[in-house]
Amino acid sequence: MTIYPSFNLKKISEYYFSKKNKELKFLEKKGNKIINLGIGNPDLFPPLGVIKTMKKASENENANKYQEYLGIPNLRKKFSEWYYKNYKIDLNPENEILPLMGSKEGILYTSMAYLNKNDYVLIPNPGYPTYTSISKLIGGKIIYYSLIEKNKWLPNLFEINKFNLNKVKIFWINYPHMPTGAKINIEELEKIVFFSRKNNILLVHDNPYSFILNDNPISIFNIKKSKDVSLELNTLSKSYNMAGWRIGMIAGKKNILENIIKIQSQVHSGMYFPLQKGAIEAMKFNNNWFFSQNKEYYKRRNIIWEICDLLKISYSKNSAGLFVWGKLNKKNDILWTNKILYKYKIFITPGSIFGSNGKGYVRLSLCCKKKFLKTAKKRIIKNY
Ligand SMILES: Cc1ncc(COP(=O)(O)O)c(C=O)c1O
C-alpha cells in the first residue's frame, strides 16, 4: 500500500541545514573535528538570572497546565515595554502583541491567515528560505524580488512595480537582512510602506537581528501609518540567545492580528510557563546587555574577516546581524564550500541556498567561539 503525501509537499524539500547536519555528523563520527560556521545558532548564554527564573517557575503549581493562548498578560506587557524602550513604539499589550514559539511559527500563521491558493507572495532573493517553503506548502505562488549588491541589497520598488501586483497578498522584508547583513534606513522603509499601502499588500517585517552589531535598531512601526498595512515578527532567539527555547512574537494592529490569533489558538495551547517567565526576565536587559554581547561578536567578526582574507572572499564591513556575507572569486559556491569542508573541515554556508542571487556568495556565522575561529584560521594557513 502507498499513502501519498500532499501535492504541496512535492513543491518543497528537506531544509538545507537538516540535510547538511547529517553529513557533518557522519564526518565527525569518522573522527573529523568540524568547525561549523554554518548555522546562526547562538552559543553565548542568555542573561544572568533567566535560567534561575525559569527553574523557579518550573516549580509553580500551575506550570504543568495548559497556558493562556495569548501568553500570560505580564509577558505581553513586557513585550510592549520592550518595544517602547528599544524602538520608541507604542504597542497595546491587550491586542497588538501575540507571543509565539519563535518567528518561524509566525511565518506559518501569517501565511495561513492571509494566503489563498494561487495568491502571490513577494519574497526576497536572497532571503530566509522559510518564506518560500511555507508559502508553497499553503499553495501560494512566489514572486522573487531581486536584492543585489549594487543596490545595497535593498528592494528595487521600480522593478517590483513591473510585476502584476493584483494578486499579491504578502510582501516579506527582513532588515538587518539575512543572509547579506544589509541595513535599511527610515527613508527606504517609508517607501516600502507607502508602496504596500498603495498596492493593498500586507507587509511583514521579519526583524530578528535588530540588536546584533546594529547601531540603529528600526521597527516597521517607526514608519507613520505602517500599522494599517504591516506586521512585525520579533524574537528572543538571537537578541537573548534563547533560540532553542523558542520564544518570539508578532505585533500589529488588532484587526490584522486577530486573523493570526484564530489560527494560533487552534494550533497551540499556550507556551511553557517557565519560558514565558524567563522571557520577561530576559527583556529586563537592554542597552548594556546588547553592548556586551556585541563586544564579543565584534571580536569574532574580526577573526572571520581574517579568514575571509585568507580564502580570498570579499565582504562589506558595513553590515549587521549574525553573519559575514562574502563574495567568492568563483561562481560555484556549493562546490567551493564542499571543497572547504573536506579540505579544512570548516563548514561554510553556500549563498545559493538563499536564492539564485546568492550564487557566488557564502555566509559565515558568528556563532562560533574565538578559539575555534583561530583554529580555523590556522588550518587555512597551514593548508591543513
Ligand atoms: C531571517 C530570519 N527569520 C526568522 C528566523 C527564525 O527565528 P526564530 O528562532 O525566532 O524562529 C531566522 C533564524 O535563523 C532568520 O534568520
Image (cartoon, rainbow, N blue to C red):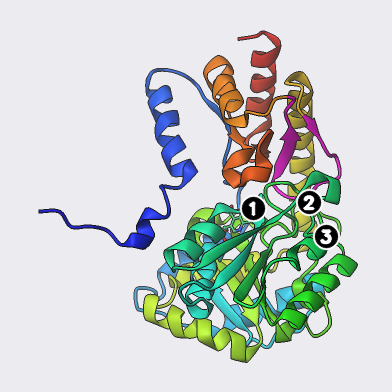
On the question of residue 94 being in view, the answer is no
Q: Secondary structure at mark 2?
A: loop
As displayed, is residue 337 above or below residue 18? above
Magenta stretch encompasses residue 267 = no
Mark 1 CB in 8 Å range of ligand 1?
yes
- Which residues are the magenta region? 314-329
Label disc, if present, on residue 127 of the rendered structure = 1
Crowdedness near tag 2: few (<14), some (14–19) or many (≥20) residues, C-alpha within 10 Å: many
Mark 3 CB in 8 Å range of ligand 1?
no
Label disc, if present, on residue 153 of the rendered structure = 2
Crowdedness near tag 1: few (<14), some (14–19) or many (≥20) residues, C-alpha within 10 Å: many
Horizontal side, residue 260 vs residue 86: left or right: left
Dot 2 amino acid type: Trp
Horizontal side, residue 302 vs residue 384: left or right: right
Residue 234 image offset from top left, x and y in percent: 64, 67
Q: Secondary structure at mark 1?
A: loop
Dot 1 amino acid type: Gly
Identify residue for label 3: 184
Dot 3 amino acid type: Ile
Residue 114 image offset from top left, x and y in percent: 53, 79
User: How far is mark 3 from mark 2, CA to CA?
Assistant: 9 Å
As displayed, is residue 155 above or below residue 126? below
Looking at the image, tell me whether mark 2 or mark 1 is earlier in sequence order.
Answer: 1
Looking at the image, tell me whether mark 3 or mark 1 is earlier in sequence order.
Answer: 1
Looking at the image, tell me whether mark 3 or mark 2 is earlier in sequence order.
Answer: 2
